[in-house]
Image: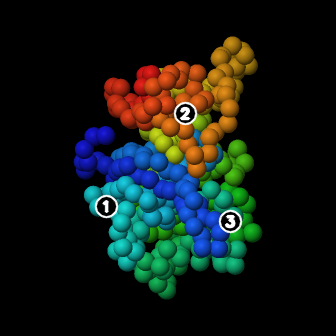
Amino acid sequence: MEAMNNDIMVEVKDLKMYFPITRGLLRKKIGDVKAVDEISFQIKKNETLGLVGESGCGKTTAGRCILRLYNPTSGSIIFNGEDISTMPERKLKERRSNMGVIFQDPFGSLNPRQSAGNIVGDPLKVHKMATGQELKNRVADLFKLVGLDTSMMDRVPHEFSGGQRQRIGVARALACSPSLVVCDEPISALDVSIQAQIINLLEDLQAKLGLTYLFIAHDLAVVQHISDRVAVMYLGRIMEITDSTELYENPMHPYTKALLSAIPIPDPKAERTRQRIVLRGEVPSPVMPPPGCHFHPRCSMAIADCSAARPPLRDVGNGHFVACIRV
């Protein structure tokens, strides 16, 4: 990957996140769940990097490592020029005010006993950024920013619809004026009509506030719409990273091609004539991933060398990175 420069907000290098598996009374370690297995990527300032892949591939774990909600097993996370991967908690708290997160479940991520105003104001209290009337005014401004009426500040989460709850989640993520927001499947639990509203809100806020997004999702059509660049993950590793338009017009990795062939096209004639790529077998376990390229047992292009060594993520031109020896 290219050297760190002033345009890069986040640089992830060789990030690993292994969860130990233990057994018996003494909790003896017998193995690891290799949720994230040595991934490297960069997020530029004011861009949206889409992180896609099927359920269980390690997308959310990668996002939580960047926020340091998990302490990574190894590797480095450089945020605004500082390595935060091993930063002590006290120092990390200062950096955290510059990061926001929008969770997948708009109900489960909100405290059912707190009012919406208190939920949105919590980060400001934690980071000692506002108190009293100033806090109320700031929360009211955040409600207006995400399209909610300030008269709703005293309501509790169950009095809101799913879309309104997610707007509360967005307001909370923006409370401390962060520069980076990790969006962890922020629309997958919402109705399709509401999904478009939240996507438009996120795009408007990015333009207005100069935000940088890591947008985690499994819906490729949504990712294409919102992302500047897209990284494709499979079983804890990144298979391909490139510009959003380039990925959809010229996918190079066999896994990316299979994913894209599964997107429905709203044209019956085109849908009937196009070729679907159906992957054989199941996704292997992250406890015992295959040797070499993780995708080779399901790949139609696989040769003997694919299982011998891990393919490096290499630039095949114009910033299009692919981890495949057959490309």
Residue 152 rendering spot, x and y as whole percentages: 66, 71
Tell me the element at label 1. strand
Residue at mark 2 to residue at mark 3: CA–CA distance = 34 Å
Residue at 47% x, 35% y is 292
Residue at mark 3 to residue at mark 1: CA–CA distance = 31 Å
Residue at 41% x, 52% y is 15
To which quarter of the image does residue 228 belong?
top left
Identify the mark at residue 83; answer none if there is no mark. Answer: 1
Q: Earlier in the sequence, mark 2 or mark 1?
A: 1
Residue 278 rendering spot, x and y as whole percentages: 67, 25
Tell me the element at label 2. loop
Residue at mark 2 to residue at mark 1: CA–CA distance = 31 Å
Say which of marks 2 and 3 sits in front: 2
Residue 12 rendering spot, x and y as whole percentages: 37, 51
Residue at 47% x, 48% y is 37
Residue 277 rendering spot, x and y as whole percentages: 64, 23
Q: Earlier in the sequence, mark 2 or mark 3?
A: 3
Compared across the picture, whether 30 is left or right of 112 comes to: left
Amino acid type, label 1: Asp
Amino acid type, label 3: Gly
Identify the residue position indicated by label 2 in the image.
295
Above or below 324: residue 216 = below
Q: Are marks 2 and 3 in contact (CB under 8 Å)?
A: no
Above or below 237: residue 80 = below
Identify the residue position indicated by label 3 in the image.
108
Q: Is 130 in front, or is 106?
A: 106
Q: Is 125 in front, or is 149?
A: 125
Tell me the element at label 3. loop
Amino acid type, label 2: Phe
